[in-house]
Image: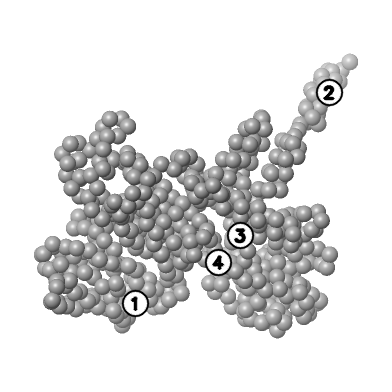
């Protein structure tokens, strides 16, 4: 027997063993009982994270799976102290609606369709437009959304179309599909410009524009068709929302919170939130907030678990929709410090303030701040309305005015801390107003925002800002007008030493560009 034949015979058992093990490999989903298989495959496929799915499929007992499912919904509950998990109830309402209105009602497979997917993830659209029999076009449906998460643009469209009569509506991509997929017949001849003209003639400019970009703020030229990837990035982000970094951060913070509500709201010492909106170097809008007790709170300083002297507080910030009904994002900041006896004695006579920063897309929100003293479990809560402007939509916009301390700003190149602008961290004393001692200099910070424009358009021009400062002394009126002339920029700093306690007005009354 040749050596080559011997080697072949030796390999055969190994090959057989390998094939046998492959044939007997079990799909972890198929090994689940119908109840858990239905949960992982039909109930939560669009909202479960990749790592969560792997963890669930690796569980060995039904008791572990039940505990996992309970923890899964708890981590998404915006109100852990409530007996009702509104997130869970809303999710199953959307799932039922999708199965009833899309796909095959008898098969209850509407969740599998593109429309069902979008509805389950984003909920009902703000507006809908149905074009079931447009001239020279395939049936189309357009949904308009106002985003409830900073991960998506503030406003956007979702377009569905029918490829053929017997098919469900398919998600439309301006880049991958293009207007030619929407036009029937040979009139367009795969020329995208011709197809855009056909859509304009049949359904108007607004629908034609939507077929080129799902984002209303993206510039579009109907006379010169050029595909953009921005809409595809939007669609990809929607599909990947469960694994989006913002979603992961929110879930991690919620999983880390205490399972039992330990805050007691006494109302004996309230707190005042002051919020300033600034734009960072990347163009992202952030809400910077100072939440300070109205008077000194001696109980802030106490004995830490390790028996040392110090403080331990938690600032929870919840971002809600403008009507306060839906939670968008939640952030927990831990504030701790160790003090010696001298520092503790001094700080007990001063008001305590906590700071935080939240990235927010342009729009209107409600912010709920809960500041809890972890040593006493006493807490204060405040709710404020915040409007984040969109600088790209206005010729000129001015931010809130920040009154900052006389301490020099410190470098914060990575913009990690609240009230950091242009790589500098400013110690806040107040937003829009602040109290000063006589003769103390007034330090102000604000930003001017404008629509994007070529730098050449600013050359040779200056911005003139007029300040109006007034005294709050009873029975007197001290008004000083000042003018600052500076080249156009996204940020202006003003340092004044008026010599009397001044309050800056809500905004400079006049901004001129010359």
Q: Which residue is mark 4?
A: 146
Give the x, y percent position of residue 69.
61, 40
Residue 442 sits in quarter: bottom left
Mark closest to the chain's N terminus, 4 or 3: 3
Find disc 1 in the rendering and name its residue. Answer: 459
Name the secondary structure under disc 2: helix
- Mark 3–mark 1 Cα distance, whole angstroms, equals 45 Å
Task: Determine which residue is flagged by label 3.
Answer: 122
Q: Is residue 419 visible?
A: no
Which residue: 65% across, 77% down? 207
Q: CA distance from mark 4 to mark 1?
A: 37 Å
Q: Earlier in the sequence, mark 2 or mark 1?
A: 2
Q: Nearer the viewer, mark 4 or mark 2?
A: 4
| Distance (Cα) linking label 2 and label 3 | 54 Å
- Cβ atoms under marks 4 and 1 closer than 8 Å: no
Q: Circle 2 sits on which residue?
A: 12
| Residues at discs 4 and 2 in contact (Cβ within 8 Å) | no
Identify the residue shown where x is 48% and y is 39%. Answer: 259
Residue 127 falls in which quadrant of the image?
bottom right
- For label 3, the SS is helix
């Amino acid at each position: 027997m040749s050596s080559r034949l011997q080697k072949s015979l030796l390999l055969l058992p190994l090959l057989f063993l390998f094939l046998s093990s492959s044939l007997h490999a079990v799909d972890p989903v198929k090994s689940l009982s119908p109840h858990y298989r239905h949960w992982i495959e039909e109930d939560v496929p669009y909202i479960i994270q990749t790592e969560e799915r792997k963890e669930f499929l690796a569980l060995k007992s039904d008791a572990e799976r039940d505990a996992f499912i309970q923890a899964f919904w708890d981590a998404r509950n915006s109100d852990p102290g409530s007996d009702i998990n509104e997130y869970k109830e809303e999710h199953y309402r959307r799932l039922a609606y999708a199965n009833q209105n899309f796909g095959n009602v008898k098969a209850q497979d509407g969740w599998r369709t593109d429309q069902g997917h979008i509805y389950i993830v984003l909920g009902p659209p703000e507006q809908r437009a149905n074009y079931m029999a447009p001239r020279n076009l395939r049936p189309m449906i357009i949904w308009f959304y106002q985003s409830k998460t900073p991960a998506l643009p503030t406003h956007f469209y979702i377009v569905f179309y029918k490829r053929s009569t017997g098919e469900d509506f398919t998600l439309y991509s301006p880049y991958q599909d293009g207007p030619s997929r929407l036009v029937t017949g040979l009139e367009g001849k795969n020329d995208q410009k011709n197809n855009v003209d056909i859509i304009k003639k049949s359904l108007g400019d607004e629908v034609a524009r939507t077929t080129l970009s799902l984002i209303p703020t993206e510039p579009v030229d109907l006379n010169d068709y050029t595909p953009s990837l921005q809409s595809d990035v939007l669609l990809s982000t929607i599909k990947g929302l469960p694994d989006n970094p913002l979603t992961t951060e929110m879930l991690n913070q919620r999983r880390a919170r205490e399972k039992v509500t330990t805050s007691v709201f006494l109302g004996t010492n309230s707190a005042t939130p002051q919020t300033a909106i600034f734009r960072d170097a990347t163009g992202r809008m952030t809400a910077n907030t100072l939440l300070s007790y109205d008077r000194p709170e001696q109980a802030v300083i106490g004995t830490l678990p390790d028996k040392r002297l110090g403080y331990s507080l938690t600032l929870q910030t919840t971002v809600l929709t403008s009507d306060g009904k839906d939670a968008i994002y939640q952030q927990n900041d831990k504030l701790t410090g160790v003090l010696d006896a001298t520092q503790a004695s001094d700080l007990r006579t001063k008001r305590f303030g906590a700071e935080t920063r939240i990235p927010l897309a342009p729009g209107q929100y409600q912010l709920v701040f809960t500041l809890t003293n972890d040593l006493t479990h006493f807490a204060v809560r405040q709710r404020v309305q915040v409007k984040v402007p969109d600088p790209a939509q206005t010729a000129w916009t001015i931010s809130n005015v920040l009154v900052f301390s006389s301490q020099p700003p410190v470098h914060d190149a990575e913009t990690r801390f609240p009230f950091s602008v242009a790589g500098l961290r400013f110690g806040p004393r107040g937003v829009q107003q602040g109290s000063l001692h006589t003769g103390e200099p007034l330090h102000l910070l604000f930003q001017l925002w404008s629509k994007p424009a070529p730098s050449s358009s600013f050359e040779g021009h200056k911005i003139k800002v007029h300040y109006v400062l007034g005294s709050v002394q009873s029975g007197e009126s001290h008004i000083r007008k000042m003018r600052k002339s500076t080249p156009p920029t996204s940020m202006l700093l003003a340092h004044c030493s008026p010599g009397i306690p001044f309050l800056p007005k809500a905004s400079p009354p006049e901004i001129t560009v010359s």
